Image (cartoon, rainbow, N blue to C red):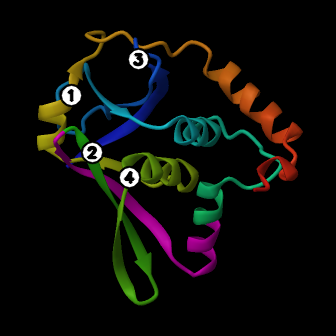
Amino acid sequence: MVPVRVLGVALDSAQHHVVLLAPLPGGGAEGGIVLPVWIGSQEAMSILVAIERAATPRPLAHDLMAVMIRELSASVERVVVTRLVEGTFFAEIHLATPRGPFVIDARPSDAIALAARTDAPILVAEAVLAEAGVPEGAMEFDTRGDDDRVEEFRKFLDDVDPDDFQG
């Protein structure tokens, strides 16, 4: 397993959100490799809010997950991007619970959003990094405007009316 960090959340050339993971120095992977993991826009915002430590007027779903885990006397030990199957990434959330270790299957975006809130390490299987990692700079990603997207999301949260979601 290779320890990584969230390098950022970006847009690819088709304007799809991608979280960029980079191996930590001394983590066993060659430098200059980035793992792009395509994610949904809501998950991108959630990861951005977490890594920016931005305050939100109400808890987001991943905030709620972190609180529930903590209040159940458990903790997130690590999250692992385990495999890549037909273009789909898979991940696991490893918990330490009063009853012992527990592993939850998860989407990488949810696992990363939770890790960002709990300061849990993020690991990637060597095979995934070898298959999907790209040299840093080999693909063009727009990371400019992350602060603008967080600010836009904050404004949305401030102005949203719950009645807008009534069916």
Residue hosting label 3: 12
Q: Earlier in the sequence, mark 1 or mark 4?
A: 4
Q: Is residue 76 covered in magenta?
A: yes
**Label 3 to label 1: alpha-carbon separation:** 15 Å
In front of the other: 92 or 119: 92
Q: Earlier in the sequence, mark 4 or mark 2?
A: 2
**Quick one: SS at disc 2?**
strand
Work out whether residue 29 can be spotted. no
Marks 4 and 2 close (CB-CB < 8 Å)? yes
| In this view, 159 is above or below 9 | below
Give how far across and how far down residue 109 sits, in percent.
43, 45
Residue hosting label 1: 133
Residue hosting label 4: 107
**Label 2 to label 3: alpha-carbon separation:** 17 Å
Residue hosting label 2: 89
The total number of labels drawn is 4
